[in-house]
Image (cartoon, rainbow, N blue to C red):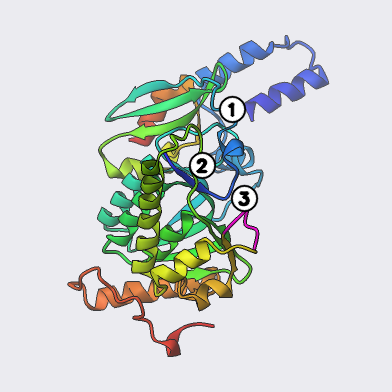
Amino acid sequence: MFYRSVRNRLELGTPGIEAPNERQIRLRMEAEPSPEPQEQKAMTQAITSFGETRTPPQPVSNVHVMSIIGQIEGHIILPPQNKTTKYEHVIPQLVAVEQSPSVEGLLVVLNTVGGDVEAGLAIAEMIDTMSKPSVSLILGGGHSIALPIAVSCKYRFIASTATVTIHPLRLSGLVIGVPQTYEYLEKMQDRVIKFVSEHSTITEDKLRELMFRTGELVRDVGTVLVGVDAVKLGLIDEVGGLSHALRILEKLIQEKHAKPEADNSLPETAIDEGEVPE
Amino acid sequence: MILYTVLPIEAVLEGLEHERSFIDLQLEGLTITVEPISMEEAVIVRVISTDPSHYLNPQLSPGTKIRLFQVSSFITTML
């Protein structure tokens, strides 16, 4: 505000006022407390950060939303052209969610191209062992390592046009061409397959078959599942969107309130068909 | 490290050889790693703390721009 008024004066050329240079203005701005009202300051912040004048008001919510976007970053900081989900930040955040008395449920929004196997599995293992209800929602695409994260939640949704790509793990960089290398890779792959098959109704064999299916040209082998396909295979519970996910989460929270001593092993098919929103 | 992703590995790792410089800032009760983007501004890269609530603080989430000369006032508004 102060800055702008100085600028205006400069442009109008008010007589008798010596034009301060940029540096002086900045120094004065730093020295003086900002005359902007708090609201306006927040608005300026919103413009610079989001390109919007208004961000939705912040009511106190009992749900924590965790968006897993871009690449899931593991032990190596990826170059800045990648959008990343940093697991060293997400994991303590999950601890905070589990421990915070004000958070009652977790909504995991997935739109990711995959990422580090260990980091992705770590997030999935954390969500899986949480006592608070969790619901996942795949939008756009939830590829590769996103699948274990999606199935780790108590209830999963996929948007009708969202896709899930299932493909084998690949080695990159320097590969030592010995059988052990492939055994190791196989072992890593088995961890993913095992986690997904244990947390959904798909069998290990079926998942492996989808992973190595030829003819769909997902780079070379693999399968692309669009919305309802993932539900039919038992990987995802339902096709739905934001309102469905939030409604189910609310329902799970209420169920937990009803029997607070219940352990976290909520049965996979606990929600009966009749009450499920379409 | 094994990447399990649909993107080609070259696209993901392109530019990895460029060295990036990070600074650790000691705030009260926590450390943050920031990457300076200009003389005045830096972007938070990582939060190092044992208090889980720090990780829920939107002011501390990675990717947030902070003004380096405001770090002292930043602490007071944060705590």
**Tag 3 residue:** A54
Foreground: A6 or B7?
B7
For image coordinates 54% across by 83% down, the residue present is: A278
In this rendering, do the residues under marks 3 and 2 share a single chain? yes
The secondary element bearing badge 2 is classed as strand
| Region in magenta | A216-221
The secondary element bearing badge 1 is classed as loop
Q: For this view, does A27 lie left or right of residue B45?
A: right
Q: Is residue A252 above or below residue A57?
A: below
Cα separation, mark 1 vs mark 2, equals 15 Å
Few, some or many C-alpha atoms within 10 Å of disc 3 (few <14, some 14-19, many ≥20)?
Answer: few
Figure quadrant of residue B60: top left
Q: Main secondary structure of the magenta part?
A: loop
**Tag 1 residue:** B15
Few, some or many C-alpha atoms within 10 Å of disc 2 (few <14, some 14-19, many ≥20)?
Answer: many
Q: Are marks 1 and 2 in contact (CB under 8 Å)?
A: no
Image x and y of residue A170, in percent = 50, 46
Image x and y of residue A148, in percent = 41, 59
Mark sitting earlier along the chain (3/2): 3
Q: Is residue A203 visible?
A: yes
Q: For this view, does A220 lie left or right of residue B20?
A: right
Q: Are marks 3 and 1 in contact (CB under 8 Å)?
A: no
